[in-house]
Image (spheres, rainbow, N blue to C red):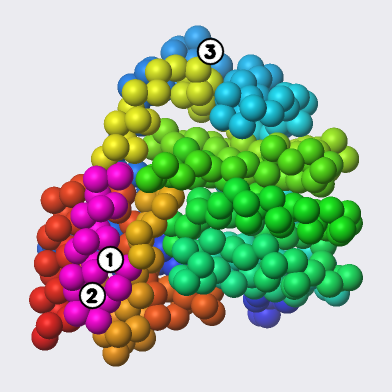
Amino acid sequence: MTLHTVPAFDRIGEENAFAVLARATVLAQSGKDIINLGIGQPDFRTPDHIVEAAIKALRDGHHGYTPATGLLACREAVARRTLATTGVEVSPENVMILPGGKPTMYAAIVMFGEPGAEIMYPDPGFPIYRSMIEFTGATPVPIPVREENGFAFSAEETLALITPKTRLIILNSPANPTGGVTPKAEIEKLVKGLEKHPDVAILSDEIYDVMTYDGEVHTSLLTFPSIRDRLIVLNGWSKTWAMTGWRMGWSIWPDRLYNLVRKLAVNCWSCVNAPSQYAGIAAIDGPQDDVDKMMRAFDRRRKVVVEGLNALPGVSCITPKGAFYAFPNVSGTGWKAKKLASALLEETGVALIGGPDFGVLGEGYMRLSYANSEENILRALERIEEFLKR
C-alpha cells in the first residue's frame, strides 16, 4: 500500500539541536560523560513561586479549556509587562497566549507564505524560520548576519533584498544562534526604509529581550508606531523564567491579523493549558530576583566562554552581546563545522551545534550555549583544546 502524503511535507526541515540532544542522550545512557552545550535552554529551575502558582491553579480546579486567545488575566499580565519593558501600551485584545514560541512563527509564516511569495529571514538564524517558509511553498530569502557586523543585521542590506514578491520579513535581536544585538540606530534606519514598503509584514522575534550585556539595551520594534499595523512580536516565558518545558509563549498582533491567528488556534491547539497560564501570570507579576541571578550567572559564563574559545588553536570568537550563545569562528581549525561538532560529541563527549544547521552562512562557525554550569564549560573547553591539539 502506498500512502500519498502531500509534497509540502517533504519540504519540512527540523531543528538539529534536538537531534544532537537525542544522540547525546544515547551516549550518556551508554555510560559516556556528556557535557551538553548544544541545547538552548537555561540550566536553572523555574522559580518556586511560579511552580507554586501552577500547583495552586490545579488545586483550585482550573482543569478545563480556556479561551483560544488565552486567559484574559494572562493577556493583561503580558500587556503590563510590555508597557514596563518597552513603554508601549498594548491592548490585551491584541495579545495571544500560545504553547511556546514556535506556534507564532508557524502562524505568521503560513499566513503570508505561498508559492510565488518571498519571505525574508536571518541567516545564520533559527532553523525553523526557513523550514516553515519552505513548507508553505514560498521562496526563502536569507538576510545575511555577518561576524564583521557584530552579528547584527544591516538595514541597508536588508532593505535591498525587498522585492514586489516580499510578503514577510523575520527579524531576531538578541539573536539565536549568534548572540548578536542589532543597535537601535540600525533598527531605526530599517524602520524608516520599511515605511516605503507598507505591504510587507514584519515578524520580530524578541524572545531574548531581557538577555543583553555590556550596557546593550534591546530595542523592541513595538516602539515604532509607523509599522505597528503590520507588526507581529514574538515573546514568551521559556528563556527569561527558565520555563522551556512549560510550553508557554505570547505574541502581539495587529488588529487586522488577530482574528486570523485566533481561528488558527481553534483549529490547531484549541488553547494553552490553564495551570501554565496561572504560572505565567506569577512569572510576570512576581519577584524577578531569580531572573537577575540567572543573568548575572550567564554574564560570568559568557566571559569564561569567550576567553576560553579565543585560547583554542584555530578558533576565534567575538563577544556576544545578547542571549546565551557564543558563535565561534572555527574555520582556522581546518574542519568543516558539522564534522567538527560530530567528532567532538563522539570522541570527547562535548555537544555543540554546527553553524550550517542555522543557515548557509553558518559554515565555519559553531554554536555554543553557555546555559550550563561554569564548571562544565571549563571542562568542555579543556576537552576541545585536547582534541584540537591532537
Rendered-image quadrant of the C terminus:
bottom left
Q: Amino acid at mark 3?
A: Gly
Q: Tag 3 or tag 2, which sits nearer the N-term? A: 3
- The residue under label 3 is 61
Q: Which residue is mark 2?
A: 344
Mark 3: few/some/many CA within 10 Å (<14, 14-19, 20+): few
The disc, 2 or 1, on the residue closer to the chain's N-terminal end is 2
Compared across the picture, whether 153 is left or right of 199 comes to left
Mark 3: secondary structure? loop
| Residue drawn at (18%, 70%) of the image | 311
Residue span colored magenta: 298-317
Q: Residue at x 70, y 56 (%)?
A: 189
Identify which amino acid the numbered label 1 is placed on: Ala
Say which of 261 and 42 sits in front: 42
Label 1 neighbour load within 10 Å: few <14, some 14-19, many 20+: many
Q: Which residue is mark 1?
A: 351
Residue 246 sits above or below residue 314 on the image: above
